[in-house]
Amino acid sequence: MMFQVDVHLSYISLVILPLMVVITRFFQKRLKKAFGDERTWTANQNSFVQERLSGMSIVQVFNRQEAEFKKFDDINVTLKAALLRTVFIFSLFFPVVELISSLFIGFILLYGGFISIKAGAVIAFIQYISMLIRPLRQIADRFNNIQRGIVGAERVLGVMDEDFAMSNTGTVSKEHFDGKIEFKNVHFAYDEKQEVLKGISFEVEPGETVAIVGATGAGKSTIISLITRLYDINSGEICLDGINLKEYELYSLRSHIGVVLQDVFLFHGSIYENLTFGDEQITLEQIRSVAKDIEVDDFIESLPGGYEYVVRERGSSISLGQRQLLSFLRAYLSDPKILILDEATSSIDPESEKLIQRATEKITKNRTSIIIAHRLSTIENADKIIVMDQGRIVEQGKHEELLNQNGYYATLYRAQLKTEVSAG
């Protein structure tokens, strides 16, 4: 229709399209960065609040209320600046679009006067230009939400595009495991910068109790993560009953492994719900029977409501020792063929430690057990002790054998024994 009225004026009118594209692109780059900064500082604010609420007792004990409030205020100031920058950029964009539209309509009127076209044609052209510009105005009006959505979508799509930590392509599913574990020249790194395990090789025979010891950062807990396939190794091979872990179906593999971690996580809910973890096949009678077997029943029944006692988020309403006992019971209930205790007695009270030690003797019978120990006195009766240092195995053997070698293990053991005697 525009070209039927005036060809030259139509071509001139189309100039506004690339001009608007350039302007939109100019503001889009700046708005994208502004929204990215806003999202980042909003996430920082939420993370800060969550951490401080979780660690409120630490903040209060160390009298850090004012200091933490100052940090929170600094985050808010930065977030406010990011928000104002976003508003400022957008507040410029829409008026610029309107200004260019108005100037262009004015130019059409001026040009129409010079070439002496009919007034009706000029009015028609203005209508056509308005129809052409209207979508651009609508985009400008929604530009704020569009850019905010793009920034948010990039984060979501970035997560969705990430490769899974490991593939669940294994097909082997077994109802019974003997429990033999083999590490064959295993190398592993969480990132490309630093290798955590450097050529680890060892065997755990079915029914053996093997302890892994070493200084912090030696790679002990990483071994546990690899056995449960929370991560896949970079090179080497890990076998269970002679079959590579990658060939097992993940659910089948993990259903035969019981884990007690040092950092016990309990969900908000009853003790019964935390112990069964949604498994409807486990009855209260079964739980009580197992709890009595490992001497945990009395502690649970002493709580208000017993097994229906509701623990708060992360188990904050009960002591660390009690959380460890519940975690131990939760692992025992699954009747695993392989039991993993990750420093389960490293930071609990003596009474709870005695309960766990007695329970350990019962639960480790006839099952492969791996214990990551902090207190070396608790693993003296292990069938084998693996000593690690900086990602490598430096010694292996029984307690007495390692002491007689007078090596790294003997040094650790004597230093810890001296510390415990001094503390006593």
Image (cartoon, rainbow, N blue to C red):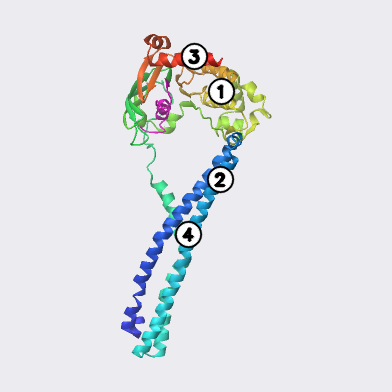
Task: Tell me which label, 1 or 4, sits earlier in the chain.
Answer: 4
Please name whichever residue, 382 or 250, is drawn nearer the observer in this view of the structure.
Answer: 382
x, y percent for residue 17: 36, 72
The residues bearing labels 4 and 3 have C-alpha atoms spaced at a distance of 61 Å
Q: Which residue is mark 2?
A: 70
Q: Residue at x 36, y 67 (%)?
A: 22
Which is in the foreground here, disc 3 or disc 1?
Answer: 3
Does 98 sit above or below residue 371?
A: below
In the rendered image, the vertical position of residue 128 relative to residue 304, given as above or below: below
Amino acid marked by disc 1: Ile
Marks 1 and 2, how far apart at CA = 35 Å
Residue to which mark 1 is pinned = 348
Q: Does residue 77 appear to the left or right of 136 in the view shown?
A: right
Check if mark 2's residue and mark 3's residue have beta carbons within 8 Å.
Answer: no
Determine the image quadrant of residue 52. top right
Report the disc number at residue 418: 3
Q: Give the Cα distance between marks 1 and 4.
A: 51 Å
Give, as a three-letter code, the residue at label 2.
Lys
Mark 3 vs mark 1, CA separation in Å: 20 Å
- Disc 4 + disc 2, Cβ < 8 Å: no
Image vertical order of residue 158 relative to residue 124, above or below: above
Give the side of residue 353 with respect to residue 223, left or right: right
- First reached walking from the N terminus: tag 2 or tag 3: 2
Residue at which label 4 appears: 86
Which is nearer the N-term, disc 4 or disc 3?
Answer: 4
Residue 377 visible, this angle:
no
Q: Secondary structure at mark 1?
A: loop
Q: Amino acid at mark 3?
A: Lys
Amino acid carrying label 4: it is: Thr
In the image, what residue occupies the spot 60% across and 18% down?
A: 351
